[in-house]
């Protein structure tokens, strides 16, 4: 029994440390964090493992602590579009209340080994009643994400391919890129297919554009990482 209690305490301490990494919880007291954690489960996923599928997913909210996740949507003409990449600290998922059920959802897949905190639909509602400030922060974060996804889809619908690819690379660099002198390194297993699905173009076009930029010394793309060598040039292309 003592071992179980110790193990439970270790798990709770781990979850608190995980939660402290998320900016929307940074103003909470230790007691508020501990109480909020009663509504959360740790869920871990292997690289390339699906968290859920669009047609089968249950409502609930995920908070990504470590890793990288892509949210996928199949279009009417059977194309796959990456609606959004989820970075550590981001929230994704959805909540159902009464008859308010989302008409469209998405599939989530881990691109790296990923660790999340999960709140079920029922637990989120209970958490919101007990801690409305947390619910408001999470709702604001979800709204911001929704608007960003809308901008992504709008960008896919129009604009030049080079602009779209440049914007995507800059966004990823800003979120997870690491700067080494004048070079920004994106250390993630992003394939040409991933970038094509994020920009609404073909793999062949993505390869052609990125190969051209590599010859021009703007980027260096190898298996498992991308280097942005001339950021200002990429920013000019993104306009």
Image (cartoon, rainbow, N blue to C red):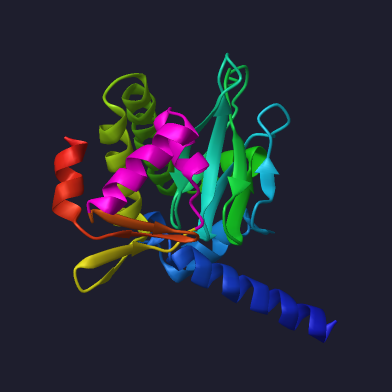
Q: Above or below — where is 136 with respect to 24?
A: above
Q: Is residue 178 visible?
A: yes
Residue located at (58% from left, 57% from top): 116
- Of 147 and 155, nearer the camera is 155
Q: Quadrant of the C terminus?
A: top left
Q: Is residue 142 visible?
A: no
**In this rendering, position of residue 213 left or right of residue 103:** left
Q: Above or below — where is 226 with respect to 51?
A: below
Q: Above or below — where is 39 with respect to 143?
A: below
Q: Position of residue 26 (x, y in %)?
A: 37, 63
**In this rendering, position of residue 233 left or right of residue 132:** left
**In this rendering, position of residue 192 left or right of residue 3:** left
Kindly indicate the quadrant of the structure image that contains residue 176: bottom left
Q: Position of residue 179 (x, y in %)?
A: 27, 69
- Of 211 and 125, nearer the camera is 211
Residue located at (25% from left, 34% from top): 163
Q: Magenta segment, which residues?
A: 189-216
Residue located at (40% from left, 47% from top): 133
């Amino acid at each position: 029994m003592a071992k179980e209690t110790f193990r439970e305490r270790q798990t709770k301490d781990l979850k608190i440390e995980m939660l402290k990494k998320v900016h929307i919880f940074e103003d909470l007291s230790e007691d508020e964090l501990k109480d909020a954690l009663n509504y959360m489960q740790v869920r871990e996923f292997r690289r390339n493992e699906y968290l859920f599928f669009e047609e089968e997913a249950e409502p609930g909210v995920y908070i990504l602590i470590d890793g990288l996740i892509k949210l996928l949507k199949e279009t009417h003409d059977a194309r796959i579009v990456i609606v959004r990449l989820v970075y550590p600290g981001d929230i994704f998922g959805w909540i159902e209340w009464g008859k308010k059920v989302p008409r469209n959802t998405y599939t989530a897949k881990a691109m790296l080994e990923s660790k999340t905190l999960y709140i079920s639909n029922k637990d989120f509602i209970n958490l919101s009643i007990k801690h409305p400030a947390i619910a408001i922060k999470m709702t604001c974060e979800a709204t911001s994400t929704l608007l960003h996804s809308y901008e992504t889809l709008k960008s896919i619908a129009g604009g030049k391919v080079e602009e779209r690819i440049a914007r995507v690379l800059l966004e990823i660099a800003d979120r997870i890129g690491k700067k080494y002198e004048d070079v920004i390194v994106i250390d993630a297993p992003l394939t040409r297919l991933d970038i094509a699905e994020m920009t609404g173009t073909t793999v062949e076009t993505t390869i052609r554009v990125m190969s051209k930029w590599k010859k021009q010394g703007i980027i260096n793309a190898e298996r498992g990482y991308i280097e942005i060598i001339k950021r200002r040039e990429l920013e000019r292309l993104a306009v």
